[in-house]
Amino acid sequence: MIWKRLRKYADDQEAKLPPEGEKDEVHVSFKERLVMALTAYVVIVLPCLLVLIGLCLLACWLFGLL
C-alpha cells in the first residue's frame, strides 16, 4: 500500500524535472569555490582536530604524562 503511494510520488516528482538537455549549467567562480572550500575546512576539519587534541590531552593526563 505504501509502495504504491511512494511510486506515485516519485513519478510525480520525476515528471516535474526538466529533460536532460534543458538543464541549466551553473558556473561557479573561483572566489565562490575558495569560500566553499574554506567553509568546509572550518566547519569539518577544525572541530575534528580540536576533539582529537582534547582526547590526546585527556589520555596524557590520565597516564600522568602531563
Image: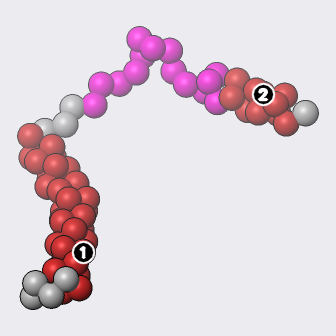
- Identify the residue at the far right of this view: 1
Q: Which residue is mark 1?
A: 55
User: In the figure, 64 relative to 43: above or below?
Assistant: below
Spot occupied by residue 45 in the image (x, y as percentages of width and height): 20, 59
Q: Quadrant of residue 54?
A: bottom left
Residue 54 visible in rendering:
no
* Mark seen at residue 12: none
Task: Indicate whether 41 appears above or below 26.
Answer: below
| Residue 18 at least partly seen | yes
Are dots 1 and 2 in contact, CB under 8 Å?
no
Quadrant of res 14: top right
> Mark 1 belongs to which amino acid?
Leu
In the foreground, 63 or 30: 63
Between the residue at mark 1 and the residue at mark 2, the CA separation in whole angstroms equals 49 Å
In the displayed structure, does residue 41 sit left or right of residue 20?
Answer: left
Secondary structure at numbered mark 1? helix
- Residues in magenta, as a range: 12-26
Task: Answer few, some or many: residues within 10 Å of disc 1's Cα (few below 14, many 20 plus, some between 14 and 19).
Answer: few
> Where residue 11 sits in the image (x, y, percent)?
70, 24
- Placement of 43 over or under 50, stated as above or below: above
Question: Helix or strand or loop: what does disc 2 sit on?
Answer: helix
Depth order, front residue of 44/36: 44
Query: Left or right: where does residue 9 sit relative to residue 28?
Result: right
Front-most of residues 36 and 1: 1
In x, y percent, where is residue 49? 18, 66
Q: Residue at image x 13%, y 39%?
A: 29
Q: Quadrant of the N terminus?
A: top right
Which of pointers 1 and 2 lies earlier in the amino acid sequence?
2
Query: Amino acid under label 2?
Result: Lys
Left or right placement of residue 10 versus residue 62 in this view: right
Q: Which residue is mark 2?
A: 8
